[in-house]
Amino acid sequence: MTASDAAFPVARPRRLRRGAALRRLVAETRVRPENLVLPMFVKEGLTEPVPISSMPGQVQHTRDSLRKAAQEAAQAGVGGVMLFGIPEHKDERGSGADDPDGVVQVALRDLAADVGDELVVMADLCLCEYTSHGHCGPLESGGHVDNDLTLERYAAVAAAQAEAGAAVVAPSGMMDGQVAAIRRGLDGAGFTQVPILAYAAKYASAFYGPFREAAEGAPQFGDRSGYQQDPANAREALREVALDVAEGADMVMVKPGLAYLDIVAKVAETSPVPVSAYQVSGEYAMIEAAAEKGWLDRERAIVETLTSYRRAGAEQVLTYWATEAARLLR
Ligand code: PBG
């Protein structure tokens, strides 16, 4: 046997996999608690938190339980929270969304005061939780969402959220021109320093299923395919991102994440602004359900999926596991 035979194969990638210390040294991707954003639901008029059956471990918060959970997130080192409000009363135009005493505005004031220095307190900006028909804006006579009327509503909601202390507003309705309208609304109300995190590439996805129970915003007729993107399309996502950036988006989001990591990667390659991705309710439910049956290792699956989001190029990941994952990662 010659020396060169003894050294065969020359390339041995396994060399760098021998032992945890070496693997840690050469890891390309890290998930840090500050990369994570916790989406939270707060419901008007609740006296006790209500468990969300399709999202085990998640609740609709009361005003007080929200404050407590936000404190816990801050202590765990989580980067931010994203608030969703569920109003007691809904109407055609979603009036509760920009009511200064509306559920999210009250919560924003609380959290801005409690944890505003430690956490980025963000507000989801949409109308579907607030409209009686469950669509993301007021309707035209034909039943489609009236795009331009919705823009006026979004601008008003953005100003109300900023006034209440939102550090970032995050429009998720997928209306054309929403970022420009919101930027104008914010600037006009004196909030030139409040960034917009645009849900730029948001797909019409089955993975939002459990969220419908959580946020009580299911469309009462039809679906959201008239405004959210077709899962078949990638090029369209790049166009949506380009438009949102041109309109003044400070950050862009891809949603959902796991089934769209190709989109996350494409957007991350070309976006001039930071990229977020949303690990949505169905992704959460899928792993929780499989883990409950003992079919996979829950914590490993959580960290693995979060790592994949980061590897694809997302700076921030919205995840219902944010607080727990932050503790695991510390
Ligand atoms: C509403 C909204 C949805 C989600 C976030 N904002 C639902 C939808 O668009 O139908 C989904 C979040 C999740 O599933 O975790 N604009």
Image (cartoon, rainbow, N blue to C red):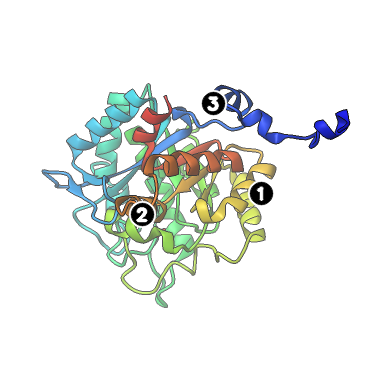
Cα gap from disc 2 to disc 1, whole angstroms: 30 Å
Q: Nearer the viewer, residue 61 or 87?
A: 61
Sequence-first tag of 3 and 1:
3
Task: Name the mark on residue 88.
Answer: none
The residue positioned 18% from the left and 35% from the top of the image is 64
Cα gap from disc 2 to disc 3, whole angstroms: 27 Å
Q: Nearer the viewer, mark 2 or mark 1?
A: 2
Give the structural element (helix, strand or loop) at label 1: helix
Pointer 3: what residue? 20
The residue positioned 17% from the left and 44% from the top of the image is 49
Sequence-first tag of 2 and 1:
1
Dots 2, 3 in contact, CB < 8 A = no
Q: Nearer the viewer, mark 3 or mark 1?
A: 3
Q: Is residue 166 visible?
A: no
Q: Quadrant of residue 66?
A: top left
Dots 3, 1 in contact, CB < 8 A = no
Pointer 2: what residue? 290
Q: Nearer the viewer, residue 62 or 93?
A: 62
Horizontal placement of 263 versus 153: left or right? right
The picture quadrant for ligand 1 comes to bottom left
The residue positioned 41% from the left and 44% from the top of the image is 158
What's under tag 2, amino acid-wise? Ala
Q: Nearer the viewer, residue 156 or 311?
A: 311
How many discs mark residues in the rendered view?
A: 3
